[in-house]
Image (spheres, grey):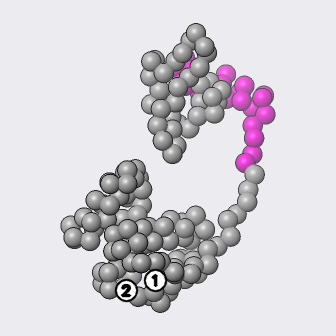
Amino acid sequence: MTPLRQKMIDAMRMRGFSIRTHQSYLSAVSELGRYYGRSPEELCVEELQAFFAHLAIERELSGASCRLYLNAVRFLYLQVLHWPSFDVPMTVPKKAQRIPELLTRAEVGRILSACANPKHHMVLCTCYGCGLRVSEVVRLQVRHIDGERQLLRVEQGKGA
């Protein structure tokens, strides 16, 4: 492991970043280094701009992906390499607006009635009824249920 990578990991740990953020940021910075074939410490602002243009134009990454790269690189230069500022303009592709398709009550009913296993049926009902993500449902425990007040405690949902 390079000293720069270790410094970045230490800086993210000190700030309490999630493991997933560690992976995403390290991957983005590694890709920057691979793109130029040298350490990100040696790059200038013009090279960073060219890298971001490559992501948006040649690789056609979404706006969210481009912002992830931008945030990772900004974190590296400001928090790890201690640049006084990070003035690298980046044009991010416009975020696509899409309205999710909603299921009708009849469709939800058909999905629930098609589930023969009582355990799976209960998981689907809980997921749908509480609006939970799959990762949140699988982490539920009996102690999270407050039957008296009819509440369900979701620990460590998205964004903690």
Give the amino acid type for the residue marked by disc 2 in the picture: Leu
Quadrant of the rendered image containing residue 78: bottom left
Residue visible at 78% across and 29% down in the picture: 105
Residue 158 part of the magenta segment: no
* Residue 33, position as x, y percentages in the image: 35, 78
> Is residue 34 in sight in this rendering?
no
* Helix, strand or loop status at disc 1: helix
For the image, the number of numbered tags is: 2
Q: Are marks 2 and 1 in contact (CB under 8 Å)?
A: yes
> With respect to residue 36, does 131 lie above or below?
above
Residue visible at 35% across and 74% down in the picture: 82
Residue annotated with mark 1: 48
> Is residue 73 in sight in this rendering?
yes
Residue extending furthest toward the top: 148
79 sits to left or right of 105: left
Q: Work out whether residue 25 or residue 35 is closer to the camera in this orientation and state it.
A: 25
Residue visible at 48% across and 67% down in the picture: 71
Give the amino acid type for the residue marked by disc 1 in the picture: Leu
Question: What is the CA distance from the residue labelled 2 to the residue labelled 1?
Answer: 7 Å
Magenta residues (range):
100-124
* Residue 86, position as x, y percentages in the image: 47, 77
Among the two numbered marks 2 and 1 on one chain, the one whose residue lies closer to the N terminus? 2
Residue annotated with mark 2: 43
Q: Main secondary structure of the magenta part?
A: helix
